[in-house]
Amino acid sequence: MSVARAVGVLRKRWYIVLAATILGGAGAFAASSTVTPIYHSTASLYFSLRTASSGSDINQGSAYTQAQMLSFAQLATSALVLDPAAAELDRGFSTIELRRMMSVTIPQNTVILDINVGTTDPERAALVANTVAASLVAAVNEVAPIDSDGAATVSARSIEPATPAIFQSAPNKQQDAFLGAVIGFLLSSVAVVLASALDTRVRSETALKAITELPLLGSIEQTPLSSDPRPVAIRQPNGSAAESFRQVRSGLRFASASHETRSLAITSSVPAEGKTWLAANLSFVLAETGKRVLLVDADLRKPRVADTFGLVGAVGLTTVLIDAIPLRSAVQAWPRSSLEILPSGAVPPNPAELLASERMKEIIQQLVDAYDLVVIDTAPVEAVADATMIAQQVDSVLIVADTRRVRRAQLASTIAVLERTGAHISGVVLNRVKARPRDSYYYVSDEPAKGPTSPRRGARVTSSAID
C-alpha cells in the first residue's frame, strides 16, 4: 500500500470518511450533553511582607515570599484551612470533599495564589472559593513568622474574589465535538485504507496486472435489475451496457489476430461471476457483424442460457450427446439475427463424463465446421472440472472476473489450472465494474429496443449447416 494508492483509496471512499467524521463529532457532542456541567470559580490572593524599611528589604522580602509560595499552596489544602471553611459553609461539606473539588495554582514567578473550585452549582463554587480563601488568610496570619512586636511578617489578602461562573467549564461541548470529529476522521481513514490493503478481490485492471500478464479485453458495468431476463444487448442495443460488450468483441478480435479462434469457451473462477451473461451478450453482438454464431450451453450442472433467452431448454446438448435426436434438431435460431443457440437440455447425472466423451469432441468439431464462431458457456473452474475438459477441445478460453466476488488467489489458480491443460487463454473480462460518469455515454441511449422481441420457438437451422 503506497502513499499514492492510500490517497486514491481515500478519494474514492471520501463519503465514508465524511460520514464517520460527522458521526464522530455529533456523537461526542451528544455524549457531552448528557454529562452534568461543572462550573469553576477562582479566588486570587496576594502574599507580601508586612514590614520593609528599604528597597533592599522589599526585594529580599519579595524573594522570601516567592520562595514560600509552595508552602502556602500546601497550606491551602490542609486541615488547618479546610476544617474552618467546612464549618463555616455549614452545608454538609467535609474536609475531604472540599479538597477534591478545589485546586491551587501559583502563576510562575509571582506571589499570587489562585484557589479554583468546581461544582455543579456556580453560586456554590464561588462561595466555597471565597470561604477557603478567607480561611487561608487567617491561617497565614497564624502560622507565619512573627516580628519583635508579635505580628505576622507575611500577610495575604484577597485581590480578586470569586464570582459565579456564567458558562460551564466542563464538559467543553465544542472541544469534545471537534475531538470526536478528528477521531472519526482518523479511524475511518485507517479503516478504509486497511480494508483496501486487505481486500484481495480483483477490483481493477491494476489488480489484474498484479496477477497475470493476460490482456484485459473489456470491462462490463453492473446493469440495473430488470424483470426482462434477456441479454441487455437485445433489450437495449444502443445502451451503454451493449457498448461494453462490443468493446469486449473488439478486444477479442485483437486477441485472435495471432491465434485463430473458431471456438471460444467462456468460464469463471467461482459461481455467479456473470459468465452466462457475458456469453449471451457477447454472442449476440458477435452476430451483429454478420457472422454465423452458435451459443452452446455446456454448463450441464446449472444451465442458464435457455432461461436467459426465453427458450425451451428441455432439448439440447445432452439430448444430442446421448444420440436421442440429431444435432440440427436441437439448435434454435434467434429472430432477425445470425445467432443460433444450443441449450443444455436435461441436467444429466454424469456431466463430467459426457463432456469428456469422444461424442462431445465430434459435436464441437461439427459445430466449428458449420459456424463462423462457436461460443461455449461452461461451469466455473474452481467449482468443478467440466471447464478444463472443454478448454482442451476449443481454440481459446475467455475468463470472466467479477470485481465483487473473485479473489486474486482464485483467479490466479484458475489461470494456472487452464494453462496446465494446455488451453489458450484469450484474456480476462472484468464484470460489475464501477459505472462511468453519464457524460461518457453521449453517443449511446439506454432506451429499450422496439420491434419483435420473442424468439421463434423450435426454429431450426438448415440441414446444410450441420452435418
Image (tube, rainbow, N blue to C red):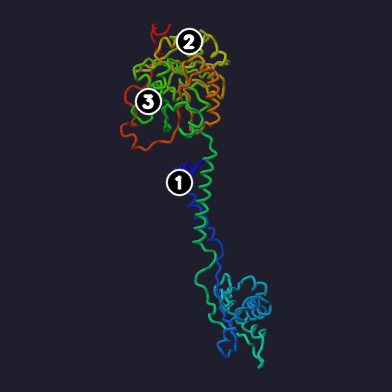
State the separation of the CA atoms marked 3 and 2: 28 Å
State the separation of the CA atoms marked 1 and 2: 54 Å
- The circle drawn on residue 246 is 3
Please name the residue that numbered disc 1 is placed on: 15
- Report whether 462 appears left or right of 176: left
Between 307 and 58, the one lying in front of the other is 58
- For residue 341, above or below residue 130: above
- Report whether 266 appears left or right of 287: right
Query: Could you say whether the residue bearing mark 1 is in a helix, strand or loop?
Result: helix
Label 1 vs 3, first from the N-terminus:
1
- Report whether 222 appears left or right of 447: right
Please name the residue that numbered disc 2 is placed on: 363
Q: Residue at x 42, y 18 (%)?
A: 258
Q: As shown in the figure, which amino acid type bears the numbered disc 3?
A: Arg
Q: Residues within 10 Å of mark 3 (few under 14, many from 20)?
A: many
Place of residue 138 in the rendered image (x, y in percent of width and height, measured from the top left):
63, 84
Place of residue 25 in the rendered image (x, y in percent of width and height, measured from the top left):
50, 55
- The quadrant in which the C terminus is found is top left
Place of residue 375 in the rendered image (x, y in percent of width and height, measured from the top left):
44, 18
Q: As shown in the figure, which amino acid type bears the numbered disc 2?
A: Ile
Between 145 and 277, the one lying in front of the other is 145
